[in-house]
Image (cartoon, grey):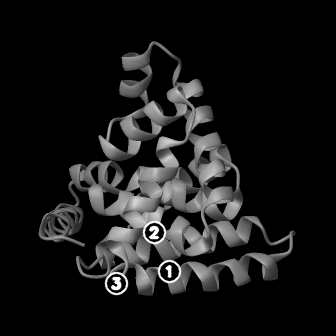
Amino acid sequence: MNDSGENRNQEICRLLRSGDQRGMELLYDVYYKSLVVWADTFLRDMNMAEDVVQDFFLSVWNGKTYQKFEPTTLASFLYVSVRNRCLNRLDKQDVFHYAVELDHVDLAFEEYNERHDEIVAKVLEEIALLPDRSREVMNGVFVEGLKYREVAERYGISVSTVKTLLGNSVKKLRERLDDEFFAGFLLFFYMLE
């Protein structure tokens, strides 16, 4: 994570430790979108992914879990917690299948820094191959960091259409990118935020 990311994590933790709700709002603004995409890699259902992340944020606030947050481990805690919640949702399915996929994701995280330029180029190449409106939505949400509502207003479509296009685009990327590059896609857009 770059210096601005570290500074944001310090600010989030400082506000939350003082009981300031703005810390939760900043946490949401910084991490929500990337956590939803992360959850969708396990659940393969964008609506369920959003539910999991929203429930997670509520439990963090209501359970005062945020009092234990540390800036240096905040991102890891969030991603591991969301992953665990997703696996709990999938407990009636073949969890072993998802555990095997996690090994590939973990490997990709380790190799991400070494192959950053190659991964970024491949991800952008795949996004460029998406249909026009899907590409515009992906660029608006992930590259420009716009909220779903802002993207919807820009292109004159509904928020649910933005979510549908985003979910379909992420599924297409998941199909076309191997595990390493797909995890790189998640990391790439997390680093942009």
- On residue 108, the disc is 1
Q: Which one is in front, 48 or 150?
A: 150
Q: Amino acid at mark 3?
A: Glu
Q: How many other residues sit within 10 Å of disc 3, few (<14), some (14-19) or many (≥20)?
A: few
Measuring from the top left, give residue 65's x and y in whole percent.
40, 71
Q: Are the residues flagged by discs 1 and 2 in contact, CB closer than 8 Å? A: yes
CA–CA distance in space, label 1 to label 2: 7 Å
Helix, strand, or loop for circle 3? loop
Could you tell me the amino acid type at mark 2? Gly
Residue 168 located left or right of residue 68: right
Q: Which mark is residue 184?
A: 2
Horizontal side of residue 17 vs 132, given as left or right: left
**CB of mark 1 within 8 Å of CB of mark 3?**
no
Using the image, determine if residue 153 lies above or below residue 98: above
Q: Nearer the viewer, mark 1 or mark 3?
A: 3
Dividing the picture into quadrants, the one containing residue 165 is top right
Q: Residue at x 45, y 12 (%)?
A: 156
Residue at 50 percent across and 61 percent down: it is 59
Horizontal and vertical percent for residue 148? 43, 32
Cα separation, mark 2 vs mark 3, equals: 11 Å
Which badge, 2 or 3, comes first in the chain's sequence? 3
Vertical placement of 140 versus 44: above or below?
A: above
Point out the tag, 1 or 2, that comes first from the N-terminus: 1
In front of the other: 173 or 18? 173
- Identify the secondary structure beneath mark 1: helix
Residue 37, how many percent across, how many down? Answer: 53, 55
Residue on which disc 3 sits? 114
Give amino acid for label 1: Ala
Is 36 displayed left or right of 96 in the figure?
left
